[in-house]
Image (cartoon, helix red, strand yellow):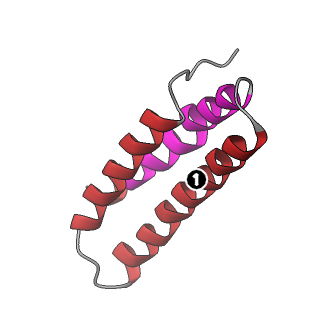
Amino acid sequence: MASLLLIMGTFWVLLPCSFGVHNFAKSHNQFLILIARISWVVLLGAHILLGYMIWFENASYWWLLLLVAAHILFLVLFGRDLGAN
């Protein structure tokens, strides 16, 4: 179950969140765009790291809740417009 949630979260970061960062970049300055892109890469890397921790280490599943909170925070800050236009 944790693997399924992790894979779905990864696809959510790759598709809608990347459109959110792209649309965020259209209307903000370079510094905020840099913060948004770095945050997106960190969020994507967190999925990879958590996948490794769950599959090969003895990690707690509570880390998934932290990742869900990171998704919500990212989408509130940068992903208001998730359209692909």
Relative placement, left or right, of 8 versus 16 is left
Rendered image quadrant of residue 33: top right
Magenta stretch: includes residue 38? no
Q: Quadrant of the C terminus?
A: top right
- How many dots with numbers? 1
Residue drawn at the location 59% of the way across and 30% of the way down? 20
**Main SS, magenta residues:** helix
Residue drawn at the location 48% of the way across and 37% of the way down? 77
Relative placement, left or right, of 72 versus 58 is right
Please say if 51 is above or below 56: above
Q: Quadrant of the N terminus?
A: bottom left
Q: Nearer the viewer, residue 31 or 23?
A: 31
Please say if 85 is above or below 25: above
Please provide the residue range marked out in magenta: 5-25
Relative placement, left or right, of 17 versus 54 is right
Q: Which residue is mark 1?
A: 39
Rendered image quadrant of residue 59: bottom left
How packed mark 1 is, by other alpha carbons closer than 10 Å (few <14, some 14-19, many 20 or more), is some
